[in-house]
Amino acid sequence: MRRFLFLFLALTSVALSHKVYLYDGEEFRTERLLFDGKMYVLDDTVFPSGLVKRVIFEKKRGAAPEKRTVKGEIRKVLDRAEEARRLFPDASLVCLLDKGVQELREDGTRTYRYHFQGLIVKPEKLNAATVLIPFEEDLEKVKVLLARTIKPDGRVINLHPEEIKITKASSGSVFFGREKHLSFTLPEVAPGDVIEYIYEDYVFNPWDRKVFDPEWYFGGEDPVLHSEITIVIPAEQKLKYVIKHDPDGKIRHAVDEGVEINRYFFHPDSVPQVVEEPLMPPVSTVVPSLHASNQENWDYIFDWYAAFQRERMEVTPEIKALADSLVSGAESEDDSIARIYHWVQRNIRYISIKGAAASGVSGHPAWETLKNGYGDCTDKSILFSTLLRAVGIEAYPVYIETNDSGELIPEIPGFQGNHCITEIFKKDGTNLFLDATGTTSRYPSFWSADHGCWAVNALKREIEKIPVPPPPSNLRSYCYVMELDRSGNLHVRYRSSYRGDWEDGVRWYWEHVKESEIGDRFREMLGEIAPDVELISYKLNYLHDISKPFSIELEYRIRNYMERAGDLLLLRLPEIEDRYRFREVSLKTRKYDIFYGTSAMIVDEYLLKFPERFKLEYVPGDTILKFKGDYFKLSAETKPGEVFYRDVFFRPDARIEVGDYDLYRAFCRGIQKSVKRPLVFREVR
């Protein structure tokens, strides 16, 4: 990067004391002004003309001094940086200013202006100097109004306009789209510097000119000294809004209703950073946030979505023929749904298709997705719903915000959501949700990121909560039949089976392992149990047939498995401790809920046979632990030369509230203590 100096050929210089007013309401007093018709230079500050609303000249003063002094706006920025250091001494980066203005015009076009100032404290945050702004050139125009680095001594290094790049968006998977990126890297940034930029996004072709649904998040992974958002709408409109995750009411807001516009202003005090905790909810669901809309209710948006969907869900002869062939011989409605569900997953490739509203939000016609053999989540949902309708099963595409990303706000009508799945109404009066986006979900399971989310069903004009499946729907079952020989070697026959999201994930993993490498993967995994393990055989049942339960069978031998403790021998049950690690309760206290996303159930069964040479001295006693609806039960039965051990873990909750953390932590630690107890033997000589 090279330092950019403003050298004007036809330069106007004024040696007056004057005030400069910006469109965002900020005001500056300066003794020196340089202007070339495009840029204003105020003492040590530079503003493009597009930011300056007006200039008021006051009394005449002497010429500006030649010597550089740190004053004016630069002095204010450096003072804010010093305040940030005092308030957040451990931060790697502090956002000094996080300011936005979102304005809706009478004609439905809208402008978003963003102003950022950040103090880079530590080297690991130098990547913040690279800014990436996504946009779609057929919908909007983005321009950078200011971009600079401010050194601790007050020197200003401005970004050269030639360093601003426009590139086409890229992704880890194949996709077709219009999205591009405007990007730049601020020059000569080092720890201790302040980076600053202002950009404006003018949306001249919005998805719908009648819908305006701004949102704002006050805070994030770095502390924020000052965050504010101003929303401007025409005077004849009203803004419906809700403030989330602000239990102490720190967000102050004001409304200025005028003749031509209504202005809404929101800002809190300084916001501390979100310190990451194991299995915490998404950051966007724990920081204070504002969600707003100019729509009084969902009616218009329901109509908007539904119009697209009806048009695209035509049952063509090709779709009817395919649907009939898939359900031919089906024994029940569930069987029919499952066959179509599995077919769409396995035969329609997922490709992210970015584009205009008609393609990106409401998808392509079902016949086109079928013909192409690929589509995004919306396309797959529309095709899946249409195939079901072709055989008389009521089905609808629904929009959600996945629980690993954020939350859909049902009180605020708008174009919310980042994913599309399917809601089905069966003839017995029950309904269910399915997600055909993936490739390995066995009916009736679906991706856990969909669980507990709000779903917008435009065709039925309803918004409802997707239930979290009960624990048996997410069962993990592990069965070990083990024989201990006279030399202390352990022979193990193992079988694991799964349901729900866990089955989906395990099957997906093994489908992506080359067949020639499967044995090596198992040997690597078994090596974590004990150092001297011999894999005898393995089997993956129904790996590629998602209509049937997937299971794994292993046979292996561990040499000299038992541990000596004096004259006793300890036998620890393989893998059980790893299954109950509970890293999420490692902290003494937590600030945020524990968020699992879905329910869980685990069943372990160990049958151990041992020779007369070993006398069983101790076996863990029966244990029952409870926390609200969660429980853990351990039991053991003994016979001559045989022990049968069984434990059951049952958790219906997708979320553990932070107020219950102490009790839940004690519950989890009780489980950990229980499963760590080994079987104890004594040698008989």
Image (spheres, helix red, strand yellow):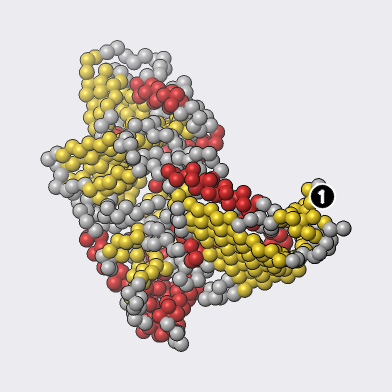
Is residue 573 shown to the viewer in this render? yes
The x and y percentages for residue 473 are 48, 66
Answer few, some or many: residues within 10 Å of disc 1's Cα (few below 14, many 20 plus, some between 14 and 19).
few
Up the image or down, 70 lies above or below 359; here it is above
Q: Residue at x 53, y 64 (%)?
A: 475
The quarter of the picture where residue 616 lies is bottom right
**Of the pair 664 and 13, the residue shown nearer to us:** 664
From the viewer's perspective, tell me whether residue 72 is left or right of residue 478: left
Direction bottom: furthest residue = 329
Q: Residue at x 25, y 21 (%)?
A: 18
Total numbered circles: 1
The x and y percentages for residue 417 are 36, 57
Q: Residue at x 75, y 66 (%)?
A: 641
Q: Which residue is mark 1?
A: 567
**Of the pair 341 and 40, the residue shown nearer to us:** 341
Direction left: furthest residue = 259
Up the image or down, 118 lies above or below 413; here it is above
Amino acid on which the number 1 mark rests in the picture: Asp
Q: Residue at x 64, y 66 (%)?
A: 479
The quarter of the picture where residue 361 lies is bottom left
The x and y percentages for residue 436 are 44, 69
**Of the pair 206 and 264, the residue shown nearer to us:** 264
Direction top: furthest residue = 62
Label 1: state its secondary structure.
loop
Is residue 395 shown to the viewer in this render? no
The x and y percentages for residue 71 are 37, 19
The quarter of the picture where residue 587 lies is top right
Up the image or down, 516 lies above or below 63; here it is below
* Quadrant assignment for the C terminus: bottom right
